[in-house]
Image: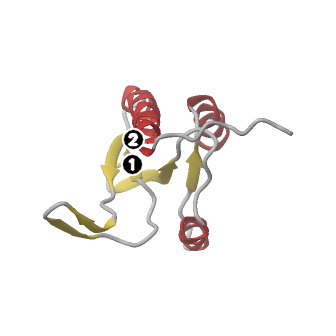
Amino acid sequence: MPKRLPRIDPKDSLLIEADLEKQVFAFLREKQWRIVRHRPTGTRGHHRYLGEKNAADALIIRPTSVGYLQGFFLELKRPGQRPTLGQLKWMADREREGYRTTWVDNLKQFRIWYWRQLY
């Protein structure tokens, strides 16, 4: 009988995603991008957020010339995790509107996407 994979503690998974976020955001800041984080819909403690349901974690932007921006939506996942169907639909809807979107679960994957899409 195959061994069962150990269950990941949800607290640990948040730390893993937070580490990826730090790495990706540091890479983007180094390239002069601005990071605009989305607030999720729902409640956290005593705070209620009215964000867009299934929205990506962040909008990444930078100016290209006076009055024009270049940017994309970015969803970060812990290693091995995929976006939900709702998140994939949200990203597909944004792409139909003309926006770039991506999701990644590691820095190497993000760098490959970045160099293919933006350079």
Q: x%, y% of residue 71?
A: 45, 51
Secondary structure state at the residue bearing disc 1: strand
Q: Going 57% across and 50% down the picture, which residue do you hit?
A: 103
Residue 67 in the figure: left or right of residue 16: left
Q: In this view, does 66 lie above or below 91?
A: above
**Residue holding disc 2:** 11
Residue 73 appears in the picture as rendered? yes
Residue reaching furthest to the left: 46
Q: Which quarter of the rendering shows the C terminus?
A: top right
Q: Which of 96 and 10 is in front in this view?
A: 10
Q: Is residue 19 above or below residue 49?
A: above
Crowd around label 1: few <14 · some 14–19 · many ≥20 (10 Å):
some
Q: In this view, does 100 lie above or below 93?
A: above
Checking the image for residue 61, the label placed there is 1
Residue 51 in the figure: left or right of residue 88: left
Crowd around label 2: few <14 · some 14–19 · many ≥20 (10 Å):
few
Q: Which quarter of the rendering shows the N terminus?
A: top right
Q: Which of 96 and 68 is in front in this view?
A: 96
The image quadrant of residue 3 is top right
Q: What residue type is labelled 2?
A: Lys
